[in-house]
Amino acid sequence: MVLEARSLSKSYGNKRAVEDVSLTAEPGDALGLLGPNGAGKSTTILMLVGLLEPDEGDVWLDGRSIRQDPRYFRQHIGLVPQRIALYERLTAEENLRFWGRVYGLTGKALAAQVEWCLELAGLTEHRRERVAHFSAGMQRRLNVAVGLVHRPKLLIMDEPTVGIDPQSRGHILDTVRRLNAEGMTVLYTSHYMEEVEYLCRRVAILDHGQVIAYGSIDDVRRLAGALSTVRLTLPEVPEDALAALRQNLTLRNVVADGNTVLFQTQEAGPAIARAVQVLADHGLHPARIDVDEPNLEAAFLHLTGRRLRDGGEEA
Amino acid sequence: MIRAALALVWVQLLQMARSRRALFALLGWPVALTAVLSFALGPAFDGQLITSVRVALVNLDTGSTGDVVAQFLRDRSGFTVTAASSQDEALADVAKGSADVAVIIPADTTEQISHGGKASVEVDAPPSKSTMQSVVAGVIQGLGTVLPVLSDVAGKGTAPRGLAEVSFVSQYSGGTALTASTYYAIGMTTLFMLTQAMNRAEAMVRDRRSDRWQRLCAAPLPALWRTVAWFVASYVLLFAQAVALWVASTLLFGAKLGTPGLTLALLAGYAFALTGLAVAVGYGINNPETVDGLSMVGANILAALGGSFYPLYNFPHWLQVLGRILPNGLMLQTWVQTALSPDPSALRLPLCVFAAMGVVCVLLSLGQRAARRNAV
């Protein structure tokens, strides 16, 4: 076992940020940590890498406790923080060299790792350009590469694709998937369920600081039962129309998201017909209707009655 | 560990060196302000720049020149001149503190000048009054150029021959007149080093709140080494700024800032104290806006009290005492004294104070770091 976290809890003042979180990651595993903003993902990660001391619980890496051997954790974990953690007036190569030195690399080993990381990030041609001149996507790719410069056993990534173009996002996801296939253990947090479904074999869903679902992707998907998620796009969503939809017992977890109404149902066809009728009674006609098969988003909606991307800021 | 820490120092210096804005704040702006103050305020202060001096004067000259010198000193604002009957009496006045400086005009002054020679006017003062001593010496040295005019106005008869060559030499060794350029070069360097230290503190607070710091803390570089790296980088920046301002003030504005050895020692000590302060503030305060406020308000208040904006010697006595307690005031006064009268022994106390301040601040910051167990 590479990583084991047992009964982690953390409070900020009176607010319980994380409560009784337990996770494990086997060698070569790809574990997703999924949850909305404020669910406690970042707090959990800070405890896993030793940047925050848990009020309760402990973390082990290769059988070593973080309380007793924090240096082992620091040497063997690669962290990719949520925001860009680079020196913007340094070039890509200078950044990689610096972080490599921080991890104790020197000489040829350092040079080889820098080359590998530049290639991995697709920045070999831009190695002598300053990070400040990079696009957001290039910065994100370098941000990931820096986390890999010392070839860690465990790569922990905290929402590494926020705010970038689809091309760079795809590049990062493919890179991480390839590294995982080559044996690197990955812990990936996101509130994008499609990223977690693409990268990970197992997932833990956090909400309000607690693990509400944990297991293989398929197991967690099944928690939503055979429910499909229906999205109806409307000119507006009045409260009385929403209340009327909620009175219909075949429509579950009815929520509004801007001009869209979402609900879950076992049989999409009849449910959509009923919903359209209810909305017509309120003078509303859907401009668009989408149906999603059961997925992690549906599981989260089923478990919490809320969408993944609802909620406040991350603790 | 040392390599990693040195890498961190290098990266911080590189970041700074590649920022035009930071470089302007570090060097350009201080040089510009020193120039403005030196050139704009210099004429206003002229030779009576910094002090209110009580002079015990003994005029032993048998001719008229001694009277001209005595009257000249009496007419200068900033000097309170009392006549003493003998050299011993004047020195006794200085010894018991009723006068700051004793000026003895020798008996052969007029005769020496009349024969185209030089007169030696003795200016005595205890070591603690060396700044005032040098001011008086500077004023008397500068008298030669205006002596003909003063002689006519005083109606003391025909001006001595060979006036163009007249000069007065005090027995004061190594004395240099304090000019506005010199004073403000010192004042501005003292001020901008303080400001730069607060800027470093603010940068440290911002860095500590960043994900980059988080990544650094997750790496195998212990907190102590991170602190050391921050300290070294900040120290290098402050010292480099001080040396650059020193060189610029000397070359561009003609400021006379003392012997290089003593000046560098003083700058090194002051930079050490300020770096300690920067690290302590950087670790002790979590809000960058608070540090920014401290930098804007606190540093300027300290600079004003310490004499960077207006000559400290013209402050009321209690304010002068307060100024000497402040690290920047202590630095300014010691540097002025060193510039006028190079005396290594005068540096002992300030350097000890600066070293102690730096060490205490670093220990405090390490203590804060240890106490904040949950912090990154």
Image (spheres, rainbow, N blue to C red):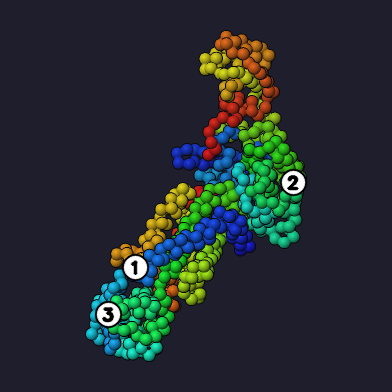
Give the chain of mark 1.
B
Disc 2 on helix, strand or loop?
loop
What chain is tagged by disc 3?
Answer: B
Q: Position of residue B376 (x, y in %)?
A: 53, 50
Closer to the camera, A261 or B265?
B265
Residue drawn at the location 53% of the way across and 60% of the way down: B27
Mark 3 falls on what kind of element? loop
Residue visible at 53% across and 36% down? A313
Image quadrant assignment for residue B22: bottom right
Disc 3/disc 1 C-alpha distance (Å): 34 Å
Task: Tell me the SS state at disc 1.
Answer: helix
Q: Are marks 1 and 2 on the same chain?
A: no
For discs 1 and 2, the disc positioned in front in the rendered view: 1
Residue sitting at x 59%, y 52%: B216
Mark in the foreground, 3 or 1: 3
Q: Position of residue A213 (x, y in %)?
A: 61, 32
| Badge 2 vs badge 3, beta-carbon distance below 8 Å | no
What amino acid is found at the position of numbered circle 3 in the picture?
Answer: Gly
- The answer to whether dots 3 and 1 both sit on one chain is yes
**Direction from residue B199 to residue A257 in the image, left or right:** right
Task: Give how far across and how far down residue A42 sits, in percent.
Answer: 57, 41
Circle 3 packing at 10 Å, graded few (<14), some (14-19), many (20+), is: few
Residue toward you, B174 or B319: B174
| Chain for numbered disc 2 | A
One can see residue B264 in this view = yes
Q: Earlier in the sequence, mark 3 or mark 1?
A: 3
Quadrant housing the N terminus of chain A: top right
Q: From mark 1 to mark 2, how far is it between C-alphas?
A: 64 Å
Q: Residue B135: x and y, percent?
A: 36, 74
Residue at image mark 2: A122
Query: Residue at label 1?
Result: B313
